[in-house]
Image: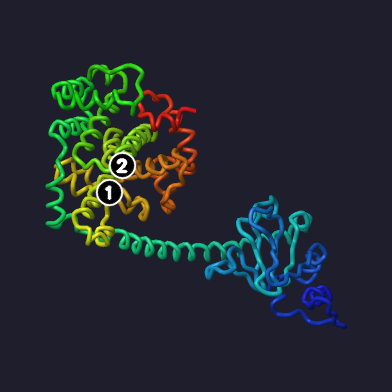
Amino acid sequence: MRNFWKHLTAPRGETRPGPEPLHAEQTTAFPDLPETEMVRLHNRALPLRLASGDVLFRADSRAERLYVIITGEIVIGDTTAPDAERFGPGDWICEFDLTQPGIHAATATALTHSQVLALERSAIVDLEPTLRDYLRHRVHQFSLQRLYRAQRRQAALARHSRALTDALIAARTSGGAGFAETETARQLFAKVPALPISTTALLNKMLDERTTKGEIVELVTMDPALTSTLLKSINSPYYGLQHQVTSVSHAIALLGHNAVYQVIMTESMRRSLPNTELFTDIHQRAIELSHLAFTLAQTLAVGRPAEVATLGILADIGLVINELLKRVNPRLKPLFDLLDPAEMGAALLRSWHLPTVVCDSLHHQHHPEFAPPARLSETVRDNVAVLYLARRLLARLHGHTPSDPGLFLEAYLALLGRAGISEVELLYEQLVPRLRAQLRQLPRSLAERLDG
């Protein structure tokens, strides 16, 4: 037995004549184990020598060896991370239950010249019951130690994550905060024509779940301006309809009352805001985002689809307001670049007396980029989550990678009842089939992305 330990601990190429006593770190690896039992382990063990940087096992590889560290230091995971799992003399590493193989979750690497005793699962199965029980007991002890260390690391990481989130929220919301309440902003808002009263009435009707299709038809039909706006837009090449639509009832029968509402809202927005290249781009994206958000809310059975569709139409209005500020005061452009478009857009809509839930949802629409769901008010959480996800899915539908890295994406998918699936799976397996079933109700720019 002593010759075994002498051979295991000798440097490469070096021999030591004569027996030597066991070193302390060697004997403490197997406390209370009689020497006869240690001989049995020796007969079945494989001594390993690792140089610094050598890999003991790799992530996702089959786990069916028990490792006992004799000398040196082994790290599991990122060797440069200060909180990585480190194992030294006397420590055991076992990532299976001694009878069934497992899978290594991370790579184990030697930090220094190390010597390790390895026991194969097949060799452990053949040991006498008392020795197997000893090994099982020791593995259990070391597994508990790893669990306790993991719990402490998790608690530390949670504190670190909360501190980083607080700092990120502060950084994203402090710049230009409160400017929307200044006299300069109010003067600008006063110069932007509000939505027509009839359009605002239609919006409130659509947000009322008790509203019937007949009431929508009546409201639009009784207002010549709304009817004209609807028919002019719906018969334009933008929708690419084969036959001309001649009445409100015909439009609703063909497209559905939600699509008709979206047309009127977006066209009313077009008339309220300047006809710039920026607004033209926003206008088209708003229509697509509105349709996508509406269908996504239906698919997820979350929130109120008509409300989310409205958010899609109004989502980027703050970008136009910020652009107007820069044009009126070009010397203050660096200041206006710091303003939050979502805050500015929400403030404008409040000046138009739009429903509070719409304004508050739009004010917080970008929070999923830097804050988890729990940091949002319950009154707007579902709306914000659906709009955030719809925006990401629209980017992917156009072949782009979302600009936001999705730090909290999984949390928002879980909130919306889609834990464990990716946004790509949600888009192509659940949302796209539903959108394809209503192609004729979609604007041509969006339908062309789906028809194939």
Of 430 and 130, nearer the camera is 430
Secondary structure under the numbered disc 1 in the rendered image: helix
Q: Residue at x 23, y 55 (%)?
A: 326
Of 5 and 305, nearer the camera is 305
Q: Residue at x 36, y 55 (%)?
A: 370
Number of residues whose C-alpha sits closer than 10 Å to that of mark 1, classed few (under 14), some (14–19) or many (20 or more) = some
The residue carrying mark 1 is 319
Inspect the image, locate mark 1, and give the three-letter code of the amino acid beneath it. Answer: Leu
Residue 250 is situated, as x and y percent measured from the top left of the image, at 26, 17
Q: Which mark is residue 329?
A: none
Using residue 192 as the reference point, say whether residue 49 is left or right of it. right
Number of residues whose C-alpha sits closer than 10 Å to that of mark 2, classed few (under 14), some (14–19) or many (20 or more) = many
Disc with the residue nearer the chain's start (1 vs 2): 2
Question: Exactly how many numbered labels are in the figure?
Answer: 2
Q: Is the residue under label 2 in contact with that under label 1 (CB below 8 Å)? A: yes
Using residue 123 as the reference point, say whether residue 315 is left or right of it. left
Q: Residue at x 44, y 66 (%)?
A: 156
Q: Within the image, what quadrant is residue 17 found in?
A: bottom right
The residue carrying mark 2 is 282
Residue 178 is situated, as x and y percent measured from the top left of the image, at 20, 58
Inspect the image, locate mark 2, and give the three-letter code of the amino acid beneath it. Answer: Ile
Q: In this picture, is 288 found above or below 325? A: above
